[in-house]
Image: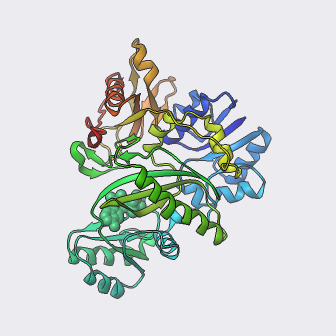
Amino acid sequence: MNVLIIGAGGREYSIGLALQKDENVDKIYFAPGNGATDELGENLEISDFNELADFVEANAVELTIVGPEAPLVEGIVDVFEKRDLAIFGPSAQAAQLEGSKIFMKNFLARHNVPTAKYIETDSLEDAYKFINTLEAPIVVKADGLCGGKGVIIAQSHDEAKKAAGEMLSGNSFGDAGTSIVVEEFLDGYELSVFAICDGKDYVVLPAAQDHKRLLNNDEGPNTGGMGAYAPTPLINDEIYRKLNERVIEPTLKGMESEGMPFTGVLFIGVMVVKGEPIILEYNVRFGDPECEEIMPLLKSPASELFYKAATGNLKNAKIEFYDKYAVGVVMASKDYPYKSTAPAEIIVDDIYHDELNENAHISYAGVSRGDDGKLYATGGRVLVCVGVGDSIKEAQERAYMLVGQVHYAGKQCRTDIAYQAL
Ligand SMILES: Nc1ncnc2c1ncn2[C@@H]1O[C@H](COP(=O)(O)OP(=O)(O)O)[C@@H](O)[C@H]1O
Ligand SMILES: [Mg+2]
């Protein structure tokens, strides 16, 4: 089958790589793709949803996979479904699970899914009153999409009130912040769990842990993610069981009963507090860089997983994973995450080492192809070096061996990805 992937990051590149290995897949298209996805398939300069659907019809594309949240929230799935085209991702209505923290929190409350105690409000007075009932630290969240910057962990009541005031006045996040969620702080450890859903049934993928901070030992500013590994030993059968019974199943049933069945990736941000999984948030697409580590662990054909999910046929699917580990190290540009950096040519050494060739690869993200045909680092997060192995340690060693083969001016990466698991 021919497949179209929507998006431009390392996440979409890694989905493309998984599809390239799949015998059932003929041609792969990316819209828009990046400077390296043209080696896996063909990049399209189309962004209008109806024009993309026209392309899909004209080129016998049987499946479209949506990577990022923005087109989902903007309704790409609705446009395709109206035209009877198979597309993997939630409708605009269902994507509100990520698009609105208020929608998500109220949904969790309606369906008794465990989450931090909260209020949602657009009134500063109500926010103050609730803040006074909590102990610091206190969490203040803008309602809408803020590119991962809309959450303030306030260390004092005053700081929480100030954050609430700035959000509600529209000063910090514009319209995305004119309604807010204030919630209690949960003290525990965080996991990312991904469930592939077809509206009724689901497949849980190996759980990942990402590294949001720029520097080793989780120091420095927050970023889009500097690396991740999967599966993480921080999860066990008991937590999986609780997640299935208390979180995923009530969510899928609830979404269906409210007339917006959920298809796509349910990305569950979990805080484990004294062994109990409490839901921080939902996203409605793969995490990036988590996707880059999970895709290489998929043993079943990727097209089967995504196509069956898109068409409501996961129930009898037998989706298998390798009994292995993957570690992904993000290589970023010099001034990430503060400002953009001048383009720098990327050179990857020829690798003669069979073990490395077979067990490590690059997922390209912020790269462009120059007129000279060479690859340039042009984005903040440039690429992800992924190592696969029989242990986290082995996967980590391979990832870092590959990092050593990649060169461009100003490259930066953490040197401790997966340290929590070792
Ligand atoms: N109630 C909470 N208690 C403790 N930490 C939290 C809480 N809510 C959010 N966080 C922290 O803030 C991060 C971002 O919050 P999240 O709800 O995931 O929003 P987003 O990803 O949209 O920015 C989380 O990954 C977590 O580390
Ligand atoms: Mg989050």
User: Is residue 135 shown above or below 241?
Assistant: below
Q: Please state if 222 lies on the left or on the right of 381 as rendered.
A: left
Q: Residue at x 55, y 66 (%)?
A: 250
The residue sitting at the top extreme is: 352
Q: In the image, is residue 175 above or below residue 281?
A: below
Number of marks in picture: 0
Quarter holding residue 133:
bottom left
**Is residue 19 visible to us here?**
yes
Task: Please tell me in which quadrant of the rendered image residue 320 appears.
Answer: top right
Q: Dividing the image into 4 quarters, which one contains the N terminus?
A: top right
- Residue 14: give x, y in percent of width and height: 51, 36
Image quarter in which the C terminus is found: top left
With 136 as the anchor, is 286 left or right in this view? Answer: right
Q: Which of the colour schemes (rainbow, by chain, secondary structure, one colour) is used? A: rainbow
Q: Nearer the viewer, residue 110 or 293?
A: 110
In the image, residue 183 sits, relative to residue 84, either above or below, namely below
Asked if residue 151 shows in the view, the reply is no
Residue 386 place in picture, x, y as percent? 41, 31
Residue drawn at (41%, 72%), measured in percent from left and top?
177
Please identify the residue farthest to the front as the structure is shown: 238
| Quarter of the image where ligand 1 sits | bottom left
- In the rendered image, residue 315, in percent from the top left (x then y), is placed at 67, 50
Taking depth in this image into account, of 188 and 131 the one nearest to the observer is 188
Q: Toward which corner of the image does residue 415 lie, by quadrant?
A: top left
The foreground one among 421 and 80 is 421
Viewer-side residue, 391 vs 55: 391
Horizontal and vertical percent position of residue 337: 32, 47
